């Protein structure tokens, strides 16, 4: 499990987050397929459904998210948050692009919206920015274990480099969203809601993609432990930032 509690990025303001997302090209890898030795049919059958699901999840236009982020930015008088969010959505779309390249190379069709994606989108639109970010960060924390497991599923050099990049980007995303959540007054139920949300999502993701996790070295115990460990870190960041603000 990756520990991001001590990262200096946890002290970033929205101005700094905005600068971070205005990233240089060195952070954007060119996915190299020249070393590919091919995947077996068995490997493709195992990994394709989850890659399709995550690819559609990463490809959202973020319309509702950007609308509520803009409202929130106005409310707190931080235009940098609006700009950072716009760049954040672009980064997520780049993630969808990496996966799409891999799918095209191995002739994996683009997936339809999965029921998981529907659930996540519906939940995110239930409320304003707080609800959006709470659901979003849950998906991003699960992505940390998913891309780690996926990287270990095959010998594909391209897939490993995509997963490495996803992890490199998703960890700051979790820190960024945790910081935003610290702007809201926390009731006693907040922690419980986030735990319930995570546990429900973990149940459905395991149900759908446990083969990928298992082939990637994750049994159910490790899967639960690491995901809940990421949630614990996010809660610590949110709560410690709240105290300082
Ligand atoms: Fe992403
Ligand atoms: Fe993300």
Image: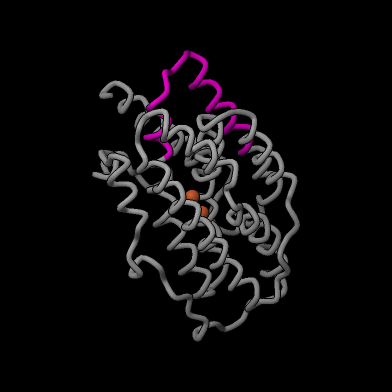
Viewer-proximal residue among 86 and 174: 86
User: Residue 169: x percent and y percent?
Assistant: 41, 55
67, above or below 61, in the image: above
Asked whether residue 148 appears in the rendered view, the answer is no
Q: Which quadrant would the C terminus be assigned to in this image?
A: top left
Let me know if residue 182 is in the magenta part: yes
Q: Residue at x 49, y 66 (%)?
A: 162
Let me know if residue 190 is in the magenta part: yes
- Dividing the picture into quadrants, the one containing residue 234 is top left
User: Residue 52: x percent and y percent?
Assistant: 67, 60
User: Residue 199: x percent and y percent?
Assistant: 59, 32
Q: Residue at x 49, y 84 (%)?
A: 35
User: What's the magenta region?
Assistant: 177-201
Position of 95 with respect to 237 (left or right) is right
Viewer-proximal residue among 221 and 181: 181
180, above or below 110, in the image: above
Position of 240 with respect to 221 (left or right) is left
Viewer-proximal residue among 69 and 109: 69
């Amino acid at each position: 499990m990756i520990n991001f509690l001590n990262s200096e990025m946890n002290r970033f303001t929205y101005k700094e987050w905005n600068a971070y997302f205005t990233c240089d090209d060195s952070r954007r890898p060119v996915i190299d397929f020249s070393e590919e030795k091919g995947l077996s049919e068995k490997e493709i059958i195992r990994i394709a459904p989850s890659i399709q699901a995550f690819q559609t999840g990463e490809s959202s236009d973020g319309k509702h998210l950007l609308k509520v982020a803009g409202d929130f930015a106005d409310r707190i008088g931080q235009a940098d948050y609006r700009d950072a969010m716009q760049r954040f959505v672009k980064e997520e779309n780049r993630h969808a692009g990496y996966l799409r390249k891999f799918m095209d190379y191995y002739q994996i069709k683009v997936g339809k919206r999965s029921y998981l994606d529907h659930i996540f989108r519906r939940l995110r639109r239930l409320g304003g920015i707080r609800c959006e970010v709470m659901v979003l960060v849950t998906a991003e924390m699960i992505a940390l274990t998913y891309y780690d497991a996926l990287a270990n599923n095959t010998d594909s050099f391209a897939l490993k480099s995509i997963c490495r990049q996803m992890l490199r980007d998703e960890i700051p995303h979790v820190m960024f969203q945790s910081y935003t959540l610290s702007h809201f007054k926390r009731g006693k139920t907040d922690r419980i809601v986030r735990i319930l949300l995570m546990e429900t999502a973990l149940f459905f993701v395991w149900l759908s993609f446990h083969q990928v996790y298992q082939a990637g070295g994750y049994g159910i115990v490790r899967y639960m432990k690491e995901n809940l460990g990421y949630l614990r870190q996010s809660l610590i960041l949110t709560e410690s930032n709240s105290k300082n603000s």
